[in-house]
Image: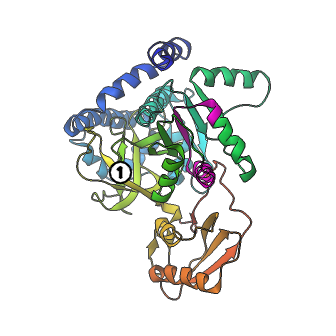
Amino acid sequence: MYETIFRRIAFPAYETLVKRRGTAGFVADYERSQWLPPEGLQALQLRALNALLDHCWREVPFLQRYWRDHGRRPGPLESPAALADYPTLTKALITANYADMIAASWRGRTLSKTTGGSTGDPFRFEYTMEAYARRTAIMWRGYGWAGAGLGTRTAYLWGTGMRQGGWGAWKDRLYHGAFNRHFFDAFSLTQADMDSLVDGIERYRPRAVVGYVAPLVSVARHMNAKGRTIAGIRGVLTGAEALYGPERRELERAFGCPAFDTYGSREVMLMASECDSHQGLHVNADHLVLETVDEAGRPVPSGTSGEVAVTDLHNYGMPMVRYLNGDRATFASGPCACGRGLPRLASVDGRVLEMIETPDGRKISGEYFVVLMLDALDVKHWQVVQTAPDAVELRIVTPAPWSPERRAKFAAGVRARAGEAFRVTVTEVPDIPKTATGKRRLTVALPRTPPGP
């Protein structure tokens, strides 16, 4: 009952009358457009894309110069695929030309945000209120597929999400209480906290759980080791890092329900979500353009991993067209059993900056190291750090040192891809530090110089 009242009355009233945003209308629009056939989605996408490009040609000085330097001229595209003729954008280019990336009619009226990115280096960008409202609507659609939609009683293992003490804390409790959600602190999670955390979630009696992969999996492993379950949960939704098969199984065993993966970033929020058919992640093609491209910026075919280039179709304040966000992904082919026309990602393959490149140009995916470590059940945390062009160090948090044989086996696995001359060391460490956004990076590569104009 509460979900229905909140979704149909309270949320639209709050967004429309109090916040003066069109979020509720966008929620309704996106609920409809997800069921369009692929050709209908492409037509919708093309209209929005041509409107955005026309706006950029008229109002965004840097893009005008940058595109002309790459041989582009104003004019409508005939299909979304023609966007591939435009050059890609990098964080370095945006930062170096920041003022000229802001549309003339939006100067002084945009919102701004900073992201740590995959390396922890701050990156600032601008966006409009409409862009934020649309991103929020898309988020609620994706969360709804996992049973964590508007007004659903949901436990978040997501950092505190709350201010501590005073008027701000009271406002936060009221706000999150209205949304029917409670935040459990994932940033200060220790083994000693596990039982009380599980007790707290159980007392809250959520219908859904949302959280970062790493802390959720830690809680699930603790529950499974102790034979604990929490009844009544319909879905567990994960974010911040990839959800692999073993971790998915831990979550589903502990919480007694399906796990749902998502893919997003602070720059554009939710880009893709998993539906209840569990056949990949549906790209929000009615809201953005997501391409997978090679080093020259050309699209790669389905089934092939490529760098992610994303275009938010509705951020007119600082349009980031074909923005390389540092991730890699692989598109799936064919329709999904759920009936939605939205295209699908088969996988999000890892960060570009987390791929290890050898001196002779071989690129080793971070997922390869995941495979090498699948049987290392005694290892609590691990991280592969490239310490030189021809060397990596495996850092492990483990109760006992590895034997010479285990070290040699890991080194042989790395050298099978990197070459026999590649140097490999294994070091026991007390902990693996998280980034400012609460993520643990599995692989840390040497920095590379981003492409310029």
Looking at the image, can residue 72 be seen? no
Q: Nearer the viewer, residue 422 or 82?
A: 422
Residue 157, position in %: x, y? Answer: 61, 41
| Range shown magenta | 202-227
- Which color scheme did the rendering employ for the protein? rainbow
**Is label 1 in a helix, a strand or a loop?**
strand
Amino acid carrying mark 1 in the image: Leu
Judged left or right of residue 169, residue 343 is left
Residue 372, position in %: x, y? Answer: 50, 73
Residue 298, position in %: x, y? Answer: 31, 58
Q: Nearer the viewer, residue 186 or 25?
A: 186
Q: Is residue 42 above or below residue 84?
A: above
Magenta: predominant secondary structure element?
helix
Residue 50, position in %: x, y? Answer: 29, 36
Q: Nearer the viewer, residue 11 or 374?
A: 374
Residue depicted at x 39% and y 55%: 347
**Residue of label 1:** 345
Please check the rendered image and state whether residue 222 is part of the magenta-colored stretch, yes or no: yes
Residue lying furthest bottom in this view?
A: 421
Looking at the image, can residue 355 be seen? yes
Count how many numbered circles sit on residues in the image: 1
Residue depicted at x 30% and y 51%: 84
Q: Nearer the viewer, residue 442 or 18?
A: 442
Residue depicted at x 60% and y 57%: 119
Q: Quadrant of the C terminus?
A: bottom left
Q: Is residue 320 above or below residue 129?
A: below
Q: Residues within 10 Å of mark 1 (few under 14, many from 20)?
A: many
Query: Which of the 4 image quadrants contains residue 340?
Result: top left
Judged left or right of residue 406, residue 102 is left
